[in-house]
Amino acid sequence: MSIDTSAKIRVVADTNIFVAAALKPGGPTEMWLRIAGQPRSSFELFVSEPILEELREKLVHKFSFSAERVKAFIGAIRERATVVNPASHLELGVIRDPDDRMILECALEAHAHLIISADQDLLLLNPFRGNGITHPRELKNIFRSDLPKSS
């Protein structure tokens, strides 16, 4: 039996979501990244090279992660996500924070249904050109069927 991936909800995670997962292995954010890589997950994760580069910069320079740890973490993201290369670029006037542009461009290129972010500037844009934008605490409501079953 093959899984119809077109039925999955297409999701883009903001850099702050990946940072949270890296800072708290085994935490709720990291759990969602693990779920994204499972074939039966109800969502598919998308990312772009600019997002991965910003993540690398933050983990190394702001949080002093070793190069090896960052490489392993980003490698795990690459295994779970589809990497897209945004062809179009948004005008800065549309967005208050220029760093958010790469998230929105990735979402547009991925034809995402949802952006997950804890960034207030992005959350205020909800919805953005057909993309819903929600806080990660809402994931348990949106993707309830993906949560591990309690024993």
Image (cartoon, rainbow, N blue to C red):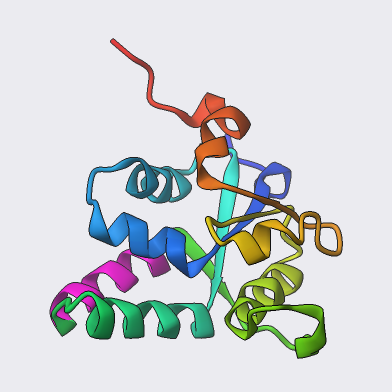
Q: Position of residue 90 (x, y in %)?
A: 78, 85
**Horizontal arrangement in the rendering, residue 134 relative to residue 15 (left or right):** right
Q: Is residue 120 above or below residue 36?
A: below
Residue at the spot 52% in from the left edge and 45% down from the top edge: 136
Q: Position of residue 65 (x, y in %)?
A: 17, 76
Front-lying residue, 84 or 141: 141
Q: Is residue 148 above or below residue 111?
A: above
Per the rendered image, the range of residues in magenta is 68-79
In which quarter of the view is residue 3 placed?
top right
Instruction: Characterize the magenta stretch by its predominant secondary structure.
Output: helix
Residue at the spot 81% in from the left edge and 80% down from the top edge: 94
Front-lying residue, 135 or 110: 135
Q: Is residue 88 visible?
A: no
In which quarter of the view is residue 7 placed?
top right
Question: Which residue ends up furthest to the top in the rendered image?
Answer: 151
Front-lying residue, 6 or 88: 88
Residue 57 in the magenta stretch? The answer is: no
Q: Is residue 85 visible?
A: yes
Residue at the spot 41% in from the left edge and 51% down from the top edge: 33
Q: Is residue 68 above or below residue 47?
A: below
Q: Quadrant of the C terminus?
A: top left
Residue 76 in the magenta stretch? The answer is: yes
In which quarter of the view is residue 116 placed?
bottom right
**Horizontal arrangement in the rendering, residue 112 relative to residue 69 (left or right):** right
Residue at the spot 48% in from the left edge and 43% down from the top edge: 39
Q: Position of residue 120 (x, y in %)?
A: 61, 60
Q: Position of residue 67 (x, y in %)?
A: 17, 84
**Horizontal arrangement in the rendering, residue 115 relative to residue 127 (left or right):** left
Q: Quadrant of the N terminus?
A: top right
